[in-house]
Amino acid sequence: MEEERKQDGAWVQVAEGRWRRLTRRDFLKSAAVGAAAGSLGPLVLTERTRAQPVTLRILQWRHFVPPYDEWFNRVFAPRWGEKNGVRVVVENVGVADLPAIAASEAARVAAGADPGHDMVQYLTPPATLERQVDTDAHREVIEELKRKVGPYIPLAEKSTYNPVTRRYFGVSDNFVPDPIHYRADLWRQVSARLTGDQRVPLRGPVTWDDIRKAGRELKRMGHPVGLGLSQEIDTGMFLRALMYSWGTGEQDEASNVILDVPPFRQRTLDALRFVKALYEETMFPGVFAWTAASNNEEFLAGRISVAMNAISIIRAAQAAAAAAIRRGENPNQSPAVQFARNTWITERAPQGPAGARGLEHVMGVYFIWRNRPRPVREAAKKLLIDLILSFDPDVAAKEGWPPGKFHASQAYDYPTFQNAIPKEKRLAYLRDDPVSKAAGDRRDKLVSIETAYEWAHNVGWPGPSNAAIDEVFNTWILNVMFARVAQGIDTPEQALDAAAAQIRRVFQKWREQGLVGGRR
Amino acid sequence: MSGRTRKWLLGGGRFLLIGVFVVFAAFPFAWMGITAFKQNSDLYNPQNNPFWFNEPPTLEHLHYAFTKTWFARWVLNTALVGLGVVTITLLLTVPAAYSLARLLGRWGERASIGIFLVYLVPPTLLFIPMSLVVTTLRLQNTLWSLIVVYPTITVPLCTWLLAGFLRGLPRELEEAAMVDGCTRLGALGRVLLPLAVPGIVTVVIFSFTLSAQEFVYALSFVTAVAQKTVSVGVPADMVRGDIFDWGPLMASAFLASVPVAALYYLVIERFVGSFSLSGALR
């Protein structure tokens, strides 16, 4: 009987063992529902697909300025996500942890697996990751921003563009200047004491020679100069700033190794001798055990009188001063407020025989991993563009995520698209800096940081920050070269020859991989 | 020199030696404890005595750790990961160690040394290939990634430790149990394991502390703040750029080490026994 029903199309099974004859009305109802589902289904499904938000996963550092993370994580990212139908997930890690995480994510990208994040903000130029990142997306973002707000500064171009492959391995949103910090009260005392050819300017050091001359006195007063000579980032920055100011460096514009090639060889030797004298006359053995935190800690503890760092020293001093004022201390007597008032930065990088050249302290560079799904890639590009445009407080306010990147970072993040926040708006903030004001400090104290556009250079200047430069930096070859001379272990010639040989090997390795130019 | 003087000198020397060792071992802990309760103005003044309080103690750093960071969650995560790792380690280690100690004859010792050598491969070399394994298993950014990966560190070491311990227990006890009708598994469970408790305690302590202090895997596999363990969460969230919040850092490190210290204290006799019992039973 059942077999017969199955063969007779007019019967339908409604339950186990129960059959019902299909009437004409049943057939028409079923056909109508089927047709409706067939025609409307794609629309309904498309709507459902559209309603599912794209998820964009971002990894970035835990910003030095806490309000910046508050702004990015709780204002910008969610509101931008809501506006663009994207679920933005932001994860913050310590700056020192980024390379290890990026290395494991790069391995996943190379293996065709999900890296774990779609976009990463690095704090150094990520040239070694070029093969794992979406260089086309980076170019598109940079070109779009150039159209919208104008030029990308040379420091950023050299920190994100590989002239050999003609690819952008990242998009720099900001850089952080690296000025000299000094104790103005101590400096004034020394300035008043030194005369004749030992005289130094009253308003802080202008040249490296000023630091050496005043440093001798400062050391005698118990407040030596604190510039690292160990295997860490701040030492690498200080020594390169000094070398570039002496007219030498690791490479030329075409990525040929130059530091031991005439006439650069003599300049490098002069720089080595200067640093040895600077150490012996103005510093103390602790600089050989320097860490990334040492300049902050030693300066803020009142021990050293001169340091080179991002504006984090001055901001930390101001934070302590603001806390003292909140506790009810009298600003004119509070040691914390006095300390902040006496912490100054120089107007420019110190000058050497060839010029006043400094470095970026931190180079903010975002990169998008290769092979991300198209909607994610497009979302990452749009977020980057909108983030950089949001340097401008008016743009940020109009979009609904005030106060914008520059104000939220308290002028720590300086735009690499210089006009992303026009100069007059930057200066307006710096002339009436709310952080300085809350600390009872001079409101326009940081206005000179604006000159960094003229003196801040990339690591590897005058060439690009390529993969070889990255490896030379992170294996501390120059740091060791200077430290061995300062300690009297090697002569300047021995240290230079050993470092140059190592640097050539590194360059050769990366040239063989097709990522670095030059021949020598 | 009279016998009494000699006795005094020997006693004094022993106490001096123990005293030096105690200071050496306890100093970091004491330093953490003091710093955890110091005010910042006290902590950062180089004129102050760094070994004691120059200003009244404060709970400010503990308050910061518990209210401004995910510290409590990280402690819980660390405990969960530790528990998972200890369980997996015990499940794998006990049968492995028994087999190596009893069933493989002369090859057992060589094999256990071979297994121990795996422990010597550092995570800094393995974290990149391991991250691919974690991705394939879809465990990224979860505590499971750590629970699955950490036994690759703990199992080799603990197998080697426990195999050595079991080898020290008299084979006759087990054989007697089997003569009395126990199966091999029964003899292991009823006779050998109760005697091996000090060794098992050692395995528990080692696997828990190794998983609690591990950094590289935790750093590369887990980036979501709510999924971090103490070893990664504390340095990541209490260091901003090149500014270290020493007060909260020390307070967190101090608090995180208290349960481990308490665990050691509770099982210290069995722990020490694990090093002496095997010899005593020979």
Image (cartoon, coloured by chain):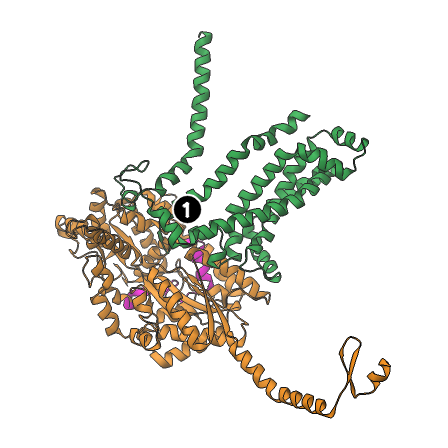
Taking the magenta stretch, the answer to whether it contains residue A280 is: no
Q: Is residue B104 visible?
A: no
Left of A220 or right of it: where is B112? right
Left of B122 or right of it: where is B259? left
Taking the magenta stretch, the answer to whether it contains residue A473 is: yes
Extent of the magenta region: A453-477
- The amino acid pointed to by label 1 is Ser
| Residue B3, image x, y percentages | 47, 8
Q: Nearer the viewer, residue A142 or A218?
A: A142
Q: Colour of chain A?
A: orange
Residue drawn where x is 71% and y is 39% of the image? B98
Q: Nearer the viewer, residue A360 or A107?
A: A107
Task: Choose top left, top right, bottom left or bottom right for residue A257.
Answer: bottom left
| Residue B178, image x, y percentages | 79, 33
Callout 1: SS: helix
Q: Residues within 10 Å of mark 1 (few under 14, many from 20)?
A: many
Residue drawn where x is 46% and y is 62% of the image? A468
Give the chain coloured green: B
Mark 1 falls within which chain?
B
Q: Is residue A260 visible?
A: yes
Above-or-below relation of A239 to A56: above
